[in-house]
Image (cartoon, rainbow, N blue to C red):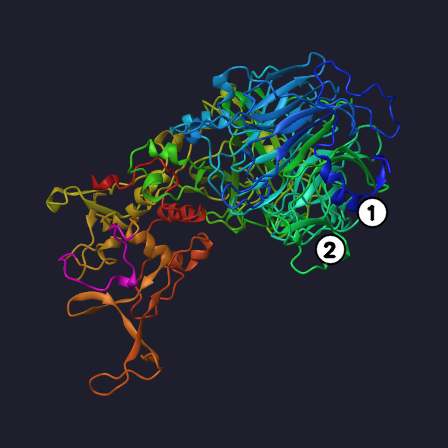
């Protein structure tokens, strides 16, 4: 039998019994320029092209010696001992050359991975990490760098030549772009670090949302390592980038925004056009495998190893039709079909740790010659059977019925060699025979292949670029998975629907708050929120609000180069639809068009312009006529009309103008898309006055947090000195309240902004005949005081103990974890208390059960009576971290919709004004976090 193309059924026992004793199974090493073919004539069965691969030790735990699984979400893991090899022919008789041998000392243990060939087949990229530095701290260890080997010059170079610049991040997964620039995944986060400085924060590498790793996101650099540009802004990893035939980037995204899933996205090499591509639903869940070691075939199909995300070293070899499917069981247009993922193994490969008779695959690379053949890293099925006379008590045998049925047999360690695999046979041809405790990974073939198409970089609208913004356009928020959730025609017609009757009033833009690493926090004051409480994931900032037009459309500027999301809210700022749990991004000058919204559990394709159902709403259905019962004019008061299929938001952006002098049209200029506003503001710009009166203005302002009839004493020590407006603390700057820019942020910290609502003195006043605020007095001629902590504390004004009103304490006193008591009581609830002998204690009630001894006999008191088991009485939390809508009962107390017939009920109507309630609502909708800036200092008012 020759080592040519042999069938799989013959191959398995042969490998287990014979070839494992052959060591490396390759010829002698050859030097540069030497003929490694031994003077043989080309074999028509042999694939006659150079190959490159990595030979590495099987990864094992240092202590237990257990084999370690490859974990996709740990891309910077260092597995020492790898070597990079080159063979000029894909045959087991060809010699091999170690390309990285001269980089370090002979015994040095470094790591190599992620080999990517150039389309011309004359050079390739790879990631390399230098050996560990003994006794050095983690932040002083070498990082992963991108290297290139050129076959023509037989030269090796680090792409970023500067040591300082090369070590600025973990750089992995390189790919050549069609213009020979280099795409890679990195922790550099170069643009995100600049945004941190703009936000007044220290620079750091943002941590992933589900663990403590520096997030790797996509970057592009020139072929010489210059002009590094960050092109993706995920808050967890963006991994395994590939370039498809059109020149777009296909990559694996780790979504960690209140979820934990891996699927495929796409974007252009300039970072525009981010969209889901494949597997958002079918690759989710604990039962779904993750796809490792991805490659693209000439036909545009994805080649991958399917295995559990953090189990097994190797898995099933699958081909995925990503060109025609969005899910394993769904085609591009959302029609049921598939499966898109098909195993190429000749027998099923279990992914639950059971013995796989078909062996396991670790990597695969598609030949570029039009055939279906693959270079594969593959291990045969082997079993360890008990054999006492062996030194370690076992002997490795092939996976035949004879050996599998022996009691005590277990899967043997894998034996990954390199093979040319033809799945049509199926036949395999050995290229690098396997060695015990070694494995071949990352194989590629150096053969020319078609160069991908070139995606022209965006030339954005110059004003948007200079402002540092992109533009988001949603056709209608009422389009839910291609179906109208309401009667859009009726909602957009002012003659049928008023603004107050429309459910969706504003789009609230949200920005991710990057989570800092511990070293960065340790460099800060110990009193910053991030150090005191270490709850630094899932934080959000508000960028602003934008009115939703009557047809449900929105067109707004959004700061570029950030991770953002949005909420759909009502007139008071309450989220009315499930939160959008995927990070979006816009590059400077980019416009993103979205059809509508989608439900969280829907598997209808969404977020991609080439996929999904037809829109439920397409804009104006006529040209040269106004939207029904609306009137819009130009700066000369001449009526203007939408173009065919323009949404109201698009039309408004096209014709709206701003004027420095409203009476002089010459001072007017086009406005373009709306700017967000940190305040909630609405003005009716649509209703034709000839049809009905336009809707009144509506606004909720931070500057009006004290716009009510409450005052406090100007001098708390001397009421005779008069009254003044209570101090309030808006969660944004004064400048942003008057003029929005891309740097505006609303940052709500509980201690700084919410606790103030409970402590703000609320002495009720009324205007006298002279327009002055005078105190309203009760029947005892005392000022009516609605200050929240005047009732919701355990002690009254004279320090006498009492049960807090409504069993709710709103004090700033620190609870056991250091957070304010009010925060914990509002969101976690507490136990009911009562007054006993002048002390406030937990109320205890009988459970109906009695104390027993070890034998189960009742324990009696001195009077011979059973001793009842007592328990506390829980009090339900009045607020919910699920948002303002989930806290509706709390808000009902202030809005005349709660039940006041209970004799113990207190009329809270008007005690918090609408602007204060808006602040509470948006705090709840953004997660009710104790803080949203980990670098702000806690307990400032205690100093």
Residue 174 appears in the rendering: no
Image point 55% across, 38% down: which residue? 74
Is 263 one of the magenta-colored residues? no
- Residue 266 is situated, as x and y percent measured from the top left of the image, at 65, 34
- Residue 300 is situated, as x and y percent measured from the top left of the image, at 77, 34
Q: Which of 761 and 15 is in front in this view?
A: 15
- Residue 940 is situated, as x and y percent measured from the top left of the image, at 25, 39
Identify the disc placed on residue 206: none
Q: In the rendered image, which residue does mark 2 sit on?
A: 403
Q: In the rendered image, which residue does mark 1 sit on?
A: 9
- Judge left or right: residue 42 versus residue 319: right
- Judge left or right: residue 146 versus residue 93: left
Task: Kindly report the secondary structure that dominates the magenta region of the rendered protein.
Answer: loop
Please, which residue is most extreme toward the top here?
153
Q: Which of 60 and 425 is in front in this view?
A: 60
Report which quarter residue 99 is drawn in: top right
Is 802 one of the magenta-colored residues? yes
- Residue 39 is situated, as x and y percent measured from the top left of the image, at 84, 18
* Between marks 2 and 1 in the image, the one whose residue lies nearer the viewer: 2
Q: What element carries label 2?
A: helix
Q: Residues within 10 Å of mark 1 (few under 14, many from 20)?
A: few
Image point 84% across, 29% down: which residue? 46
Please, which residue is most extreme toward the front here?
389
Q: What element carries label 1?
A: helix
Q: Residues within 10 Å of mark 2 (few under 14, many from 20)?
A: some
Report the span colored magenta.
797-816
């Amino acid at each position: 039998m020759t080592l040519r193309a042999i069938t799989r059924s013959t191959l398995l026992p042969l490998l287990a019994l014979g070839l494992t004793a052959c060591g490396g199974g390759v010829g002698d090493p050859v030097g540069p320029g030497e003929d490694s073919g031994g003077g043989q004539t080309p074999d028509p069965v042999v694939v006659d092209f150079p190959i490159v691969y990595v030979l590495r030790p099987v990864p094992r735990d240092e202590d237990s010696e257990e084999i370690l699984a490859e974990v996709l979400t740990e891309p910077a893991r260092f597995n020492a001992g790898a070597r990079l090899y080159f063979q000029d022919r894909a045959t087991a008789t060809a010699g091999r050359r170690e390309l990285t041998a001269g980089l370090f000392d002979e015994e040095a243990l470094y790591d190599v991975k992620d080999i990517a060939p150039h389309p011309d087949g004359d050079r390739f990229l790879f990631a390399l990490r230098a050996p560990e530095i003994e006794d050095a701290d983690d932040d002083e260890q070498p990082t992963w760098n991108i290297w290139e080997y050129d076959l023509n010059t037989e030269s090796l170079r680090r792409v970023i030549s500067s040591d300082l610049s090369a070590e600025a991040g973990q750089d992995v997964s390189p790919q050549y772009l069609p213009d020979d620039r280099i795409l890679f995944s990195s922790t550099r986060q170069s643009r995100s670090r600049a945004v941190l400085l703009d936000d007044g924060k220290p620079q750091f590498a943002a941590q992933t949302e589900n663990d403590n790793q520096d997030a790797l996101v996509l970057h592009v650099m020139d072929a010489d390592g210059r002009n590094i540009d960050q092109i993706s802004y995920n808050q967890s990893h963006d991994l395994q980038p590939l370039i498809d035939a059109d020149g777009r980037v296909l990559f694996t995204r780790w979504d960690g925004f209140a979820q934990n899933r891996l699927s495929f996205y796409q974007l252009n090499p300039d970072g525009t056009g981010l969209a889901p591509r494949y597997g958002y639903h079918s690759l989710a869940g604990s039962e779904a495998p993750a796809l490792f070691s991805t490659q693209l075939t000439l036909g545009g199909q994805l080649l991958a190893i399917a295995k559990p995300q953090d189990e097994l070293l190797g898995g099933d070899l699958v081909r995925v039709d990503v060109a025609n499917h969005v899910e394993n069981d769904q085609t591009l247009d959302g029609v049921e079909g598939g499966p898109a993922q098909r195993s190429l193994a000749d027998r099923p490969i279990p992914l639950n740790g059971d013995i796989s008779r078909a062996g396991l695959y670790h990597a695969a690379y598609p030949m570029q010659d039009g055939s279906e053949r693959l270079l594969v890293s593959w291990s045969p099925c082997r079993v360890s059977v008990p054999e006492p006379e062996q030194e370690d008590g076992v002997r490795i045998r092939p996976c035949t019925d004879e050996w599998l049925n022996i009691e005590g047999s277990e899967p043997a360690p894998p034996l990954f060699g390199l093979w040319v695999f033809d799945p049509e046979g199926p036949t395999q041809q050995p290229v690098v025979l396997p060695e015990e405790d070694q494995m071949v990974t990352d194989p590629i073939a150096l053969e020319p292949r078609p160069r991908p198409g070139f995606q022209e970089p965006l030339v954005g609208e110059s004003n948007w670029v200079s402002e540092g913004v992109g533009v988001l356009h949603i056709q209608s928020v009422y389009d839910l998975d291609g179906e109208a959730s309401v009667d859009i025609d009726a909602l957009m017609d002012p003659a049928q629907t008023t603004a107050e009757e429309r459910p969706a009033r504003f789009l609230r833009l949200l920005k991710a708050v990057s989570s800092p690493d511990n070293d960065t926090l340790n460099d800060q004051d110990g009193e910053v929120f991030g150090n005191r409480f270490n709850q630094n994931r899932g934080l959000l900032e508000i960028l602003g609000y934008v009115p939703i037009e009557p047809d449900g459309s929105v067109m707004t500027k959004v700061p570029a180069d950030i991770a953002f999301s949005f909420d759909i809210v009502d007139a008071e700022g309450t989220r009315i639809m499930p939160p959008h749990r995927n990070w979006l991004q816009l590059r400077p000058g980019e416009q993103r068009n979205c059809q509508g919204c989608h439900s969280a559990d829907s598997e209808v394709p969404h977020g991609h312009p080439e996929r999904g159902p037809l829109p439920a709403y397409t804009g104006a259905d006529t040209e040269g006529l106004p939207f029904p019962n609306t009137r819009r004019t130009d700066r000369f008061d001449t009526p203007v009309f939408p173009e065919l299929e323009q949404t109201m938001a698009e039309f408004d952006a096209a014709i709206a103008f701003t004027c420095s002098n409203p009476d002089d049209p010459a001072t007017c200029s086009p406005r373009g898309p709306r700017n967000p506003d940190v305040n909630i503001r609405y003005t009716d710009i649509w209703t034709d006055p000839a049809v009905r009166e336009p809707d009144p203005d509506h606004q909720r302002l931070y500057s009006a947090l004290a716009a009510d009839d409450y005052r406090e004493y100007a001098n708390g020590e001397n009421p005779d000195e008069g009254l003044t407006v209570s101090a309030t603390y808006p969660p944004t700057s004064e400048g942003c309240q008057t003029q929005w820019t891309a740097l505006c942020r609303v940052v709500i910290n509980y201690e700084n902004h919410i606790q103030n609502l409970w402590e703000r003195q609320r002495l009720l006043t009324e205007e006298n005949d002279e327009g002055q605020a005078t105190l309203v007095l009760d029947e005892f001629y005392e000022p009516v005081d609605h200050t929240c902590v005047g009732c919701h504390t355990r002690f009254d004004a004279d320090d006498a103990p009492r049960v807090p009103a409504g069993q709710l304490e709103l004090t700033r006193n620190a609870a056991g974890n250091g957070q304010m008591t009010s925060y914990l009581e509002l969101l976690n609830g507490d136990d009911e208390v009562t007054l006993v002998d002048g002390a406030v204690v937990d109320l205890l009630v009988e459970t109906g059960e009695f104390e027993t001894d070890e034998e189960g006999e009742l324990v009696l008191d001195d009077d011979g009576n059973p001793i009842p088991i007592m328990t506390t009485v829980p009090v339900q939390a009045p607020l919910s971290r699920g948002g303002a809508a989930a806290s509706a009962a709390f808000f009902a107390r202030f809005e005349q919709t709660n039940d006041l017939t209970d004799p113990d009920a207190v009329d809270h109507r008007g005690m918090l004004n609408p602007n204060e309630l808006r602040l509470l609502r948006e705090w709840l909708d953004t997660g009710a976090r104790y803080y949203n800036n980990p670098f702000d200092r806690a307990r400032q008012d205690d100093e």
